[in-house]
Image (cartoon, coloured by chain):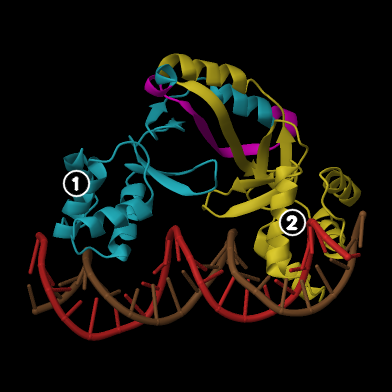
Chain colours: A yellow, B cyan, C red, D brown
Amino acid sequence: MAEEMLDALDRAGVRLTGPRRRLAALIARREGHFTAADLVKDVGRRRLGIGRATVFRLLELLGEQGLLERIDLPDGSHAYIPCEPTHHHHLVCLECGTTTDVGDCGIEAVTREAARRSGFTIEQHRLELFGRCPNCSSAN
Amino acid sequence: MAEEMLDALDRAGVRLTGPRRRLAALIARREGHFTAADLVKDVGRRRLGIGRATVFRLLELLGEQGLLERIDLPDGSHAYIPCEPTHHHHLVCLECGTTTDVGDCGIEAVTREAARRSGFTIEQHRLELFGRCPNCSSAN
DNA sequence: CTTCATGCAAACCCTTTGCACGTCG
DNA sequence: CGACGTGCAAAGGGTTTGCATGAAG
């Protein structure tokens, strides 16, 4: 997973520096969504000596490559989730933070219908689903 | 429109003070989405002597009443749009900022399908559609 | 060796909070 | 009059930027 990221960065023509390798490893070992602050904390805890700026810069790079997506949590804060660079939507567990991707599920039809009703030309859409993952639903 | 807001605030038991009346008027005369900063600028331009804090506090109040919704633009920034206090989704014109509400459009089926595939229990969803409104599509 | 990346700190937003004063009902 | 609302300034997060130094190819 970390390799996948590094490969993509390599293909994008950016340098595979030490900080980037170490950060990619940190991201890969995360589960579910995480915030930039989480990563910055990880970096500090492990005394990796990587600066805040570098963290944000790598998050942006990975976002451009489609390996990371920034989502907006219901409380308005931002989080990142690792994902495949194909079109999809996110399911976020509100309890443990786990995320899953789902494919189309018929949303095309919804956007077509909305376009018909409104007269808009729809260019992009964002669908985020929040709830409880199988684990957290049954634990409850 | 401003009256609608004031009525709702009244019903909610908050005081209809001068600053709140003036702010409601400013919001009512806006078209499409706007940011908190936009409102703060309006306030300054007209020398209404209303503080930043009051703007944010009213935005929050109106949000609680369901008359205003905070949406996340594709660039990650936050904006507010006036809307009806019923469940719906937003269509945002990327060119002029106009917004429209659309009702269900079949999204229930989509969430059910996503739940089935993933095993998640879905508690809330957010769908935002971005594109061009009839005006801006034809002008092009 | 040249270009690109880094760390640090400071700068910048955006939003919230504390508090003394004003005002609505 | 008493509770609630206000403006101001300061504090607080999160994110970006400027710049001298360091590493990659």
Of tags 2 and 1, the one toward the viewer is: 2
- Label 2: chain? A
Question: Which residue does the numbered mark 1 point to in the structure image?
Answer: B25
Q: Amino acid at mark 1?
A: Ala
Residue shown at 72%/28% (left/top)? A103
Is B37 magenta? The answer is no
Would residue B114 appear left or right of A76 to someone viewing this image? Answer: right
Checking the image for residue A58, the label placed there is 2
Report which quarter residue A40 is drawn in. Answer: bottom right
Q: Position of residue A31 (x, y in %)?
A: 78, 53
Label 2: which secondary element:
helix
Residue B128 is situated, as x and y percent measured from the top left of the image, at 51, 33
* Residue B105 visible (yes or no): yes
Magenta-drawn segment: B116-136
Q: Looking at numbered disc 2 in the image, what kind of residue is underneath it?
A: Leu
Does label 1 lie on the same chain as label 2?
no
Residue B127 drawn in magenta: yes
Q: Does dot 1 land on a helix, a strand or a loop? A: helix
